[in-house]
Amino acid sequence: MLRGVFVTGTDTGIGKTVISAALLVRYRSAAVVRYWKPIQTGTDRDDDTATVSMLAGDTGRPPLTDGVRLARPLSPHLAARYAGQTIALEPLLSVARSQSLDERFVVEGAGGVLVPINESRLMIDLMAALGLPVLVVSRSTLGTINHTLLTLEALRSRGLAVAGVIMNGPRNDDNREAIERYGGVDVVGQVPSFDQIGRDTVLRMASLIDPDARLLARVFA
């Protein structure tokens, strides 16, 4: 099975894709890192895999492009329904099993942990099946404590290891302290939001992630 980290968020549009690119930049000198988004919706508007490839630049290996690709920007179960499909986990797990253990993957989820994949499975079921430690991307602003703690509780209820939290937005040390204290988790990065995102901003984000290399030691070494 894969080695690396699964990137999820407390909400959709939280910055998972840009932070995934920053993670590739942060760790590309320490390991062979690759990006994979197993389930991607809204491909008629955006291609997250292409975006990450453009923002991260050369990481030694191209992104893994196998997986579910659905046109409508909806929850995976709805996007699949409109496409006349049903998303099954086993083909995705088969892709994961075929990858080299010498590589480290940054796997990005679609939406949050409880987003439905099909009529009976949620994103957290895919996360549990892959068994990767989970990195949670959260907002830094009002409401983030509740949303982040709920996400952490859901992950731990399935026995998933939490690699850490990255907070996205204006720096808020009070919210960081509360998440670390009540969530029993390390905030491994606080990154600002940017109006324009390019390689330079991703480089800046990467420099703010995991400054003491705790995540590196846990996941990417």
Image: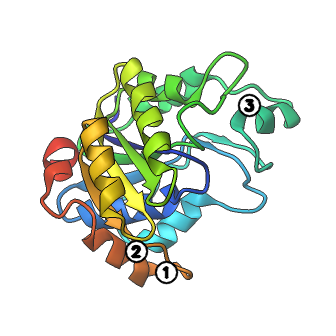
Q: Give, as a three-letter code, the residue at label 3.
A: His
Q: Is residue 10 left or right of residue 76?
A: left
Q: Position of residue 36 (x, y in %)?
A: 47, 48
Which quadrant would residue 20 be assigned to in this image?
A: bottom left
Spatial CA span between label 3 and label 2: 31 Å
> Which residue in the protein does label 3 denote?
77
Residue kind at label 2, given as amino acid type: Val
- Where in the figure is residue 176, as x and y percent of width and height? 31, 55
Task: Say if residue 112 shows up in the picture.
Answer: yes
At x 40% / y 84%, what residue is drawn?
Answer: 200
> On the image, numbered disc 1 is attached to which residue?
198
- Badge 1 density bin: few <14, some 14–19, many ≥20, Cα 10 Å: some
Which amino acid is tagged 1?
Answer: Gly
Mark 2–mark 1 CB contact (< 8 Å): yes
Q: Nearer the viewer, residue 28 or 115?
A: 115
Q: Which mark is residue 92?
A: none
User: At which x and y percent is residue 78?
Assistant: 79, 34
28 above or below 156? below
Quick one: label 2, few (<14), some, or many (20+) residues within 10 Å? many
